[in-house]
Amino acid sequence: MRVDSLASSPGAAESGATGSVRPPGFYTLFRTEFILAVRRRSDIVNPLLFFVTVLAMMPLGIGPDPEMLARMAGGLIWVMALLATLLSQESLFRGDYEDGSLEQLALQTQPLYFSVLAKVLVHWLVTGLPLAVLSPLLGMMLNLGEAGYWPLFMSLALGTASLSLIGAVGAALTVALRRPGLLLALIIMPLYVPVLIFGTGAVQAALDGYGYGPQMAILGAILAAAAALAPLAAAGAIRISLEN
Amino acid sequence: MVSAQSGTATDSAPGLALSARGLTCERDGRILFEGLEFALSVGAALQIEGANGAGKSTLIRTLIGTASDYQGHILWRGVPLPKSLPSLRESLLYIGHNAGVRRGLTPLENLAWYGASHTDALVALDAVGLYGFEDVLCQQLSAGQTRRVALARLYLPETPSLWILDEPLAALDVAGVASLETQMTRHLQRGGSVLLTSHQPVTIAPLAKINLADFQASAHDSLEHSYAG
């Protein structure tokens, strides 16, 4: 390494001062977030580990009766996926807030909407999607009927994306607080309820031999609404949090 | 009225970058400063002085539009702030107290996030003495080195014209301070403007100073104001 090349900066910054560095595009934002997420492996593994461990405990807690487990499996898996997502939400904006890059994002000329969307997309890719992929396996462990595997995966894949988006609003609102813990849960949980109802509804309908198309359509509609509105709300909440 | 270059500059003067008129900020019911006036011209630098807690960072956050709770007027190129905020942000390079360096990224990745091309980022990192550290995670760098990663943005070939720097010299060594001063002077010569806070003496020219202590209300006044507002 060179000891110090500070005093002479060859060729650095010789041109005009009126240029403006172009803000990072959506791809750069997404790639940066993805690199960060992959490097913070514990943030990815912890929710998954929680999800698997708690569900593995369930037969011990409520008894090994296959009939009863089969009846509860869909709901249990959904509730645990919801809690695992909630656990991982808290850190969504925290690091960026503490190192000042959230402030830098808010100062950029491009809308904060896309920055938030990139962050949430990565969050879903590293928490929601793995949860959905793992869910049929856990369904098998809890004696969930075979007819429920596909709707469970589909509803979780759609549903966790909505959960990530909705949770981003709560995370943005509480980012300035040192220990948001319960407050975050209180803000987000009521908004999670519709997703939970239609998610478990889809699994139950499939198990009862009905079509689960309507529930999936509603989950899709919730996702579409959340993708359009939640980043806007989160962007507003970030600006409020940065005021103090 | 403190002017960074010529005291006769008016708000509509083409050479005027950022100015404040009768600016009052309060925080938690306490008035930090009152009736603050300054004018920062193109090609000039302004240093904001004040004790810890005097409101330097609050002033800066108000000027860049992050904090919107103020009375008075802030003008960017003669246009009042809420209206001219997008234009201000287009020509703003802000390095805050928290430098905006992501610890999980390498210096190169950090600069790429700020829109720098690979070669430009390498040259800038070389200029701040981080040659050889391009691919080390920032969490493994020292405080001073992390600071330098943020300051490397000032060495990119095309920087925005208005630099607002909150304590840029903190954690820098002597050579680092000298280089930064050279770079700021160069920026002024190119027609840029610099507004900075520092507890250390800064030797760049032309440099004007304002002290927030000169705009502080008495304890009695501030109590009255906080209830009136």
Image (spheres, grey):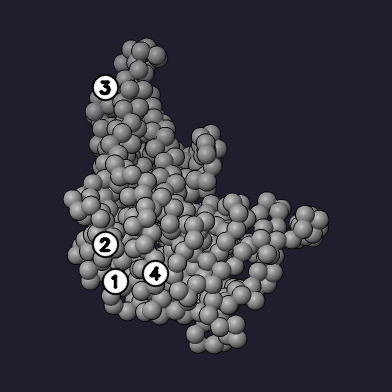
**Residue placed under numbered mark 3 in the picture:** A141
- Vertical comparison of B34 with B87: above or below: above
Can residue A7 be seen here? The reply is yes
Marks 2 and 1 sit apart, C-alpha to C-alpha, by: 10 Å
Q: Chain of mark 2?
A: B
Marks 3 and 1 sit apart, C-alpha to C-alpha, by: 62 Å
Q: Position of residue A175 (x, y in %)?
A: 49, 45
Q: Position of residue A209 (x, y in %)?
A: 31, 34
Q: Is A231 on the left-hand or right-hand side of A129?
A: right
Please tell me the numbered disc located at residue B184: 4
Mark 4 or mark 2: whose residue is earlier in sequence: 2
Instruction: Determine the image quadrant of residue A84.
Output: top left
Please tell me the numbered disc located at residue A13: 1
Q: Badge 3, how many Cα within 10 Å: few under 14, some, many 20+? A: some
Eye-nearest disc, 4 or 1: 4
Q: Chain of mark 3?
A: A
Eye-nearest disc, 3 or 4: 4
Q: Position of residue A60 (x, y in %)?
A: 35, 13
Please tell me the numbered disc located at residue A234: none
Can residue A216 be seen here? The reply is no
Residue type at numbered disc 1: Ala
Eye-nearest disc, 3 or 2: 2
The residue sitting at 38% across, 53% down in the picture is: B172
Eye-nearest disc, 3 or 1: 1
**Residue placed under numbered mark 2 in the picture:** B127
The residue sitting at 38% across, 59% down in the picture is: B177
Residue type at numbered disc 2: Ala
